Amino acid sequence: MKMSVIGCGYLGAVHAAAMAELGHEVVGIDVDAPKIANLAAGRAPFFEPGLGEMLTQVSASGRLRFSVDMAAVRGSKVHFIAVGTPQKHGGNAADLSYVDAAIDDLIPYLTDGDLVVGKSTVPVGTAARLAKKLQASGTGAVLAWNPEFLREGFAVQDTISPDRLVYGIDEGTADGDHARAVLDEVYAMALSKETPLVVADYATAELVKVAANAFLATKISFINAMAEIAEVTGADVTKLADAIGHDNRIGRRFLNAGVGFGGGCLPKDIRAFTARAEELGRGESVAFLKEIDSINLRRRQRAVEMAIQSLGGSVNDRRIAVLGLAFKPNSDDVRDSPALDVAVQLKGLGGDVICHDPEAMANAQTKHPQLSFAASAVEAVTGADAIIVVTEWDEYKQLDPAAIFALAAGTLVIDGRNCLDMSAWREAGWEYRSMGRPDREQALVD
Ligand code: UGA
């Protein structure tokens, strides 16, 4: 099929390449000229495992093109909208200006029977409004909403083999039937592998996406709330997570306590959901998400306070190696990253902070040029009074605590992701502290 993907960020670039990989003829559109130049040259403009290889392969096939000019969508029958919906400045709601601009710019090129497919995460009610806009355009184009559930770091695999497909369509109408038939053709490969498909109305499809992210955020903040209780009782949140996770109804995934969730999705999605529910007069239904957000933000604070307390009441002029800047491993994304936040806070408190991340240093430097960076984790920890691990990259988990001990000036390590081998680090002589797990010398309960 001939298709366009409008917006080539973390979502759109992977979607465009994956659709071409599946045999479709794709053009990717973005207003960011350097990004388009990279993609057109077969280079991934951000770190995403497998994307570079896939781009090289499909670019050679001639099925994938990129352009900054919307006119390049001519001839495509399906148009995916994959632009960002960031948090509005000064508020919690989502900024829909990029979605509206994409549709407005696309309309002049639409022809009868074209399918416009929204993939961006939007507040419930947006698709119905955009469907009316398309109708009013007189182009004969039809709208579907098809939320995306890919995870950064696994985006290629999640796009080629999604765990479910959701079509939001105008059910029970000829337009709805047309949209479904076109989407079935787009996703023929996944459907042939019996990927579960849920066909719903627009509102349900929009809500599925925000409900999924709200649930995941809730699960993480739940275990972090348990970590807070563990910290004052001497309990171990990791063992607690293992034990409750054995219950299939609960499940162990997304129960890792630490400095909490970040990224371009979970934080802003729960805030936008809260804002939308308030607009709908149902603020109380998701008011708990404000608490989820607060618990999450408290965990970064907890890591900073732990550093201050363990270093004798101040981090001023103390050399602190911050390992990790990305919001999670296998990503270079620092949007709302707890790791970057911890680094910036420690620096702001007068710490002599030296940061390292295998992939995210360039993005971190652009946002916070005041930070200092080391070329390797070993360089960062050399001479450090304390180490704080805030992104659980494999390379940090594999550090040799005995070898590092000889290089550091101090003996404190704070494991902000509960990812290091606690006994190995303690045996090597480290004062090891983590999130929601007992310190050796604790006597917490009266
Ligand atoms: C999230 C969802 O998982 C995807 O399904 C969704 O498609 C995507 O948002 C989106 O809306 O586009 P992503 O932002 O890539 O994906 O990251 P996650 O893997 O969900 O992790 C989010 C944050 O939670 C990270 O900072 C991670 O470190 C943290 N986390 C995750 C924990 O603190 N504990 C856990 O147990 C799991």
Image: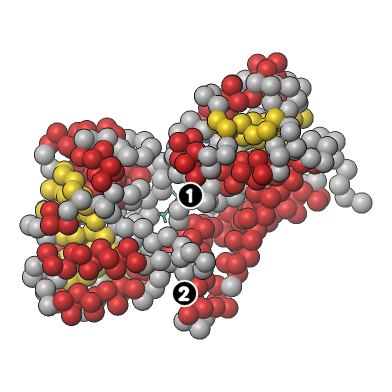
Q: Are marks 2 and 1 in contact (CB under 8 Å)?
A: no
Q: Is residue 314 left or right of residue 49?
A: right
Residue toward you, 86 or 281: 86
The numbered dot on residue 437 is: none
Ligand 1 has an atom within 8 Å of the beta carbon of the residue at disc 1: no
Residue type at mark 2 is Arg
Q: Ligand 1 closer than 8 Å to the CB at disc 2? A: no
The quadrant where residue 385 appears: top right
Residue carrying label 1: 335
First reached walking from the N terminus: tag 2 or tag 1: 2
> In terms of depth relative to the viewer, which is nearer, 365 or 118?
365
Looking at the image, the residue that sits furthest to the front is 370
Residue found at x 65% / y 58%: 295
In what element is the residue under mark 1? Answer: loop
Measuring from the top left, give residue 208's x and y in whole percent: 40, 66
What color scheme is it?
Answer: secondary structure
- Gap between marks 2 and 1 measured at Cα: 22 Å
- Position above or below: 197 against 285: above
**Residue 354, position in %: x, y?**
61, 31
Query: Which of labels 2 and 1 is toward the front?
Result: 1
Question: Which residue is pictured at 52% across the width and 66% down the height?
Answer: 90
Q: Residue 258: percent from the left, percent from the top?
A: 63, 45
Q: Can residue 5 be seen in this view?
A: yes
Q: Read off the residue under disc 2.
A: 276
